Amino acid sequence: MESIEQTATDLLDKFVQWVNAFMGDIVQGDVTNITLWLAVATGVYFGIRTLQSIIAGLFKSKKRPPNSIRNIIGHVIGATNSLFLIPLSLVVTLPFFEGIPENYELWLKRIFIVTIILQAAFWLRIVAQAFLEGAVLDHAEEDSSLSSARSLISLFVNVAIFAIAIIMIIDNLGGNVTGLIAGLGVGGIAIGLAAQNIFEDLFASLSIILDKPFTKGDFVSFNGFNGNIERIGLKTTRIKALSGEQIVVSNSNLLSNEIQNFKRMNERRGTFTVGVTYQTPHSALEALPSRLEDLIENQGNCRFDRSHLSGYGASSIDFTTVYYVLSRDYKEFMDVQHAILLKVHALFEDMGIEFAYPTQTIFVERDAVEDNA
């Protein structure tokens, strides 16, 4: 606190000294040259302003996205402030005039440095806004939660940009910024520790917006829960479970788990294993995989992958078949699977193959029974 008060006092003393020196230079200097210099600088200023409007209009275009490079350049040029252009005009025209007090050049350069720092902060703010706007527009859907996230992040970015600009201005004016930076650092650490969980969820929300692991309406599965994404907020995400209830989970906790996004899939994998009896003829066993392939290929809206004799079980000879339904819709997948399994049953009837089920065959030695009798 003492360092901040000392910095403010030093800046006030320097300003008073500059006013006294400025008024003294006006009295001692060539009034005609000063007036002429100011007149020429005014003309240069209006010329720059006119050129600025023309160039900004050439770059801006409603046909292009707001965050395109041309539009960003147009907005940056258009946002160039008069508080920057006036000192610029004075600095540019100063070397062409004599009789201007030497003290003018020193203070004019300091003012120009201050204005160019502020102007650079405004330019950087426009670029950051365009980046955030583009990040939201690129998202599949923009709802109130994303707009709120963008506004909050924009606020943090603006505070950071202008805080750095103010520190640079104080430093260029000769103020002591070491204590100020140290104080801001300690305060920032204290705020960060107090709101650690809030910032963690906020940055997780930002990660969802930029990385887009899921969007509103996606069907996801995580940590044993399944449901549709209803809303993505600043701190939490709401999911509508299959059983009807709403699941509210923090963004950081959600991203810390593995998430299965079923909306991103283009097809669903289906597989089934059937067992036939050991009494099935070899010719039927050999022909069965190709018959299953023809059955699946003729089903429609699905792609056959493979079918093989996969092993000898305790009471069956097992065949494993894999196919893909060319749709992400789960109901359509179940309809196709239902039709395929019914056709498998009909195929077995046509080929005279019997489904195997757990059975045991007991062999009794006849001679041993007669001896015991």
Image: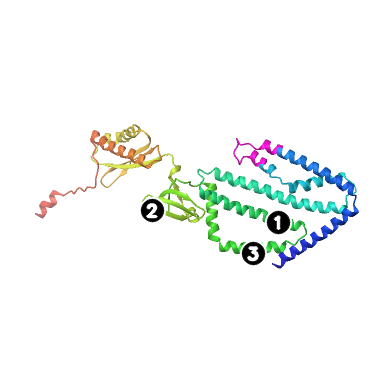
- How far apart are labels 2 and 3 at the CA level? 44 Å
Q: Nearer the viewer, residue 35 or 16?
A: 35
Q: Residue under circle 2?
A: 245
Q: Nearer the viewer, residue 340 or 72?
A: 72
Three-letter code for the amino acid on which mark 1 is drawn:
Ile
Q: Could you tell me which secondary element the residue under label 2 belongs to?
A: loop
Q: Position of residue 69 (x, y in %)?
A: 64, 40
Q: Classify mark 1: residues with Cα within 10 Å, few (<14), some (14-19) or many (20+).
A: some
Residue at 57% of width from left, 53% of height from top? 152
Q: Residue under circle 1?
A: 166
Which tag, 3 or 1, sits closer to the chain's start?
Answer: 1
Three-letter code for the amino acid on which mark 2 is drawn:
Glu
Q: Position of residue 260 (x, y in %)?
A: 44, 48
Three-letter code for the amino acid on which mark 3 is drawn:
Val
Q: Classify mark 3: residues with Cα within 10 Å, few (<14), some (14-19) or many (20+).
A: few
Q: Do residues under tags 3 and 1 come within 8 Å of each other at their CB atoms?
A: no
Which mark, by number, is residue 186?
Answer: 3
